[in-house]
Image (tube, rainbow, N blue to C red):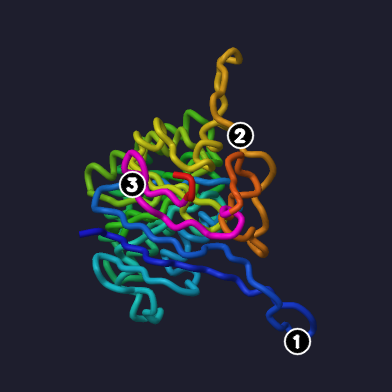
Amino acid sequence: MAVIEVDGLKKHFPIRRGLLRRVGGYVFAVDGVSFSIESGETLGLVGESGCGKSTLGRAVMRLIEPTAGTIRLAGEDITALSRKALRPYRRQMQIVFQDPFSSLNPRMTVGEIVGEPLKVHGIARGRAREERVAALFHRVGLRPAQMRNYPHEFSGGQRQRVSIARALALEPRFIVADEPVSALDVSIQAQVINLLMDLQREQRLSYLFISHNLGVVEHISHRIAVMYLGRIVEYADKVALFTRPQHPYTEALLAAVPVPDPKVKRDRPVAEGDVPSPVRPPSGCHFHPRCPYAEARCRVDPPVLKRGAAGHLVACHLR
């Protein structure tokens, strides 16, 4: 059974204007996304900045309320649960944010930060909590002696390890990793990614790994979903997606990855222009203004995800 199942998830932010703050439109940040993640599996979520990846991660976690759709955790529908009813499920799902410094309280020691979930959920107190926090520090590669230090005394990579330790404190089944290594040096990125993979093998964790770095996503993911302007446009096994991309947007993303050899000729077109505004997304296929293969129907009819070549799910009229 899938650990997390998302069906038709939408998040539309109202735009309020004037003195009376009347709704004058919506930001279509997430517009009908569906996916599932099995136990011990990593689903990579990729796309350009502004495509709605982080909003999707927060909506799945119920950190922001979805506009429509359903979210099931281990088969239980948690979409409409109240804050109080949702609290037991919080132990099963956690999030690691992009910027470890801004997500850690500078007035608390890192030991207090990691131990806070244990206190809030009444799992451990006093000496027992200290011992559990020390074990978590050891597990993520930090010294228990550092528990009394404050976040500003750590490097970026160490702070992200603290964030991971905090996420692991409640022994969750599912973790949203929202650009967890984008603010780190390349060598530190590798350490954090390897740590996440080791933890997954040991504890059968499921990850929704959000990133714009295709190299990192290829390394850690089992399957990959490609997101464009609030919608999933391709969904496939990572090997199939990187070797035989089906959607023109996926082709453009892969073509944009830097190649160290300047003599290498690219056989795929790079998408021109920027991501359109989610306030007024293009009609039909959202990607058609930037697509080199667009036809007349692409400008009118929105494509649906359907099974295409190589077993991919792809939202494209031409595939």
Q: Label 1 amino acid?
A: Leu
* Disc 2 crowd, CA 10 A, few/some/many (<14, 14-19, 20+): many
Q: Which residue is mark 2?
A: 270
Give the Cα distance between marks 2 and 3: 27 Å
User: Dot 3: within a 10 Å radius of its alpha carbon, few (fewer than 14), some, or many (20 or more) residues?
Assistant: many
Q: Are marks 1 and 3 in contact (CB under 8 Å)?
A: no
Q: Spatial distance from mark 2 to mark 1, Cα to Cα?
A: 44 Å
Question: What residue lies at 54% left-to-right and 37% top-to-bottom?
Answer: 253
> What's the residue at 22%, 44% (across, down)?
202
Label 1 to label 3: alpha-carbon separation: 45 Å
Provide the residue span drawn in magenta: 297-315
Q: Residue furthest bottom?
A: 20
Q: Position of residue 178 (x, y in %)?
A: 47, 51
Q: Does dot 3 land on a helix, a strand or a loop?
A: strand
Q: How many numbered marks, from 0 up?
A: 3
Is 133 drawn above or below residue 184 in the view shown?
below
Which residue position is annotated with label 3? 42
Q: Amino acid at mark 3?
A: Thr
Residue 285 occupies which quadrant of the picture? bottom right
Query: Could you say where residue 48 lies in the image, as x and y percent from the top left?
Result: 57, 46
The answer to whether residue 191 is seen in the rendering is no
- Element type at mark 1: loop
Circle nearer the N terminus (2, 3) = 3
Inspect the magenta stretch and tell me whether residue 300 lies in it.
yes
In the picture of the structure, the residue carrying the numbered disc 1 is: 20
Residue 47 in sight? yes
Q: Nearer the viewer, residue 61 or 313?
A: 313
